[in-house]
Amino acid sequence: MVGHHSDPSGPDLALGITLADLPDDGKLVGHRDGEAVLLVRRGAEIFAVAAACSHYGGPLIDGRVGDDGIRCPWHHACFDLRTGEALRAPALSSLACWSVERRGDRIFVGEKRQKPSPAPDDVGKAGVSPQRIVIVGGGAAGFAAAERLRRVRFQGAIVMISDDEAAPVDRPNLSKDYLAGKAPEDWIPLRKEGFYARNGIDLRLATKVASIDIRTKEVVLADETRIAFDKLLLATGAEPVRLTIPGADQPHVHTLRSLADCRTIIAQTRSARHAVVLGASFIGLEVAAALRARGVDVHVVAPEERPMERVLGPKMGDFIRALHEENGVVFHLGDAAASIGQSEILLRSGRTLAAELIVAGIGVRPRIDLAEAAGLATDRGVVVDAYLETSVPGIYAAGDIARWPDPHTGESIRVEHWVVAQRQGAAAALNMIGRRKKFTDVPFFWSQHYDVPINYVGHAERWDAIEVEGDIAAKDCLLRFNRGGGVLAVATIFRDADSLQAELAMEKSSA
């Protein structure tokens, strides 16, 4: 779901509006010099910022205003109303801001303001700032850490090591609009090519880290090069679980994790007419929807009885299955692949399916080998404290590998969500330079199936009951996942305001 900017509407804010047009806690969209501007009033203060979220263009008029700023209704990015700064992922770029003037009972929007910059070395207590930070991983968490370090004007060296051949990309789009052919490739990089050199980030692509020498505080590369660090962030992410059945190594069998994977799948859709997706996970079904958008026949094979029942429960699972079936997807549930031929796949049930293209979405596993070999504490992930620091001082972990103490559930959790990884990377960056910022964000993810977005706030690995408000089949619903009398998570379809409200409520309940 990528937004598109529309022509400015509403009043010309250079000509002014009356104070009565903008009541306290009210929002209004107008325009100034051809740009859409959102006005927000909070008591005596009136703010003017860009009307569209800098992530995918979500309409901020439909967002929620809280103590920290305004939150986007689509994917819960948050912006400071005074400065426009992007406070929370998935947005990385700030919003434009305009000056506002009150004359009597009228409000006028003036010129666009210059963006303020923090002073160099505004990074914590004197003497704390490290000279060199090394980041291992080129995904959401690693990129967000490097970006945040430079945004707060960290003056030391940053070395970012990625075994991917591509610079950091918008990975959620790889299974959504980009794979479906609805988003051009120039939308995929998180930053343009010159960003890294311009910001003094030593990005080393297609580079493998062999080990971490804790004693000497060095990262050892596969070619035996050693890179010293003062602080280290492990953001190695997760890797797809690979098929081990006969025929799984053939060129038409794929997993989807990288831009290269996505490009290869897209190339094969030009000749493949029949595809099989193995796994009914979020990624698997997003791939199924994207392939249907390209006109490919799609069959989904999965061992469970309902797609995504483990995460969203039976009623939502039935809805998701029906939604995909309405769009031509054929399900083979309670089944699994036994072997793969050149243009077909044999299931354990004995059925054979035509398949010139196969995408396996059977899960991922955290890449914790480096951490384990270095002697860091692990427990189905890399164990970190509330500041995302591992058992070894000066070494941090963020993203898919991190298992952290979640204040909302009271449990130690690990999640594989893009937004969580970005937010953890940003928090770890501040902690590495002495800010001491606990990571307390409520987990959030979104999934897209055809024209239906599913937003999920919180984290519920198990629940006592699911409370349904609204009508799932009508695509207008909110589901509460309850345990022990409390709400652990909320899933919504086309109830963006309710999703934001649930996020705010969870934050306040654990504050």
Image (cartoon, rainbow, N blue to C red):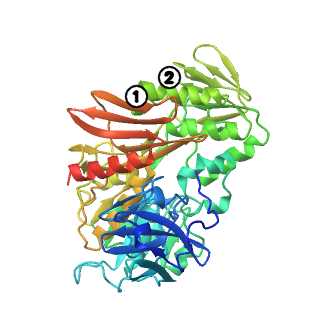
Q: Residues within 10 Å of mark 1 (few under 14, many from 20)?
A: some
In the rendered view, tell whether residue 24 sits above or below residue 112: above
Amino acid beneath label 2: Pro
Residue 303: image tag? 2
Amino acid beneath label 1: Gly
Q: Nearer the viewer, residue 341 or 211?
A: 341
Mark 1: secondary structure = helix
Looking at the rendered image, the disc whose residue lies closer to the viewer, 1 or 2, is 1
In the rendered view, tell whether residue 425 sits above or below residue 286: below
**Residue wearing tag 1:** 313
Residue 45 in the image: state x and y as whole percent. 33, 74
At a point 64% along the width and 20% down the height, the residue shown is 346
All told, the count of numbered labels is 2
Residue 442 in the image: state x and y as whole percent. 32, 51
Residue 361 in the image: state x and y as whole percent. 54, 36
Residue 139 in the image: state x and y as whole percent. 48, 58
- Image quadrant where residue 186 sits: bottom right
Q: Nearer the viewer, residue 207 or 345?
A: 345
At a point 68% along the width and 51% down the height, the residue shown is 182
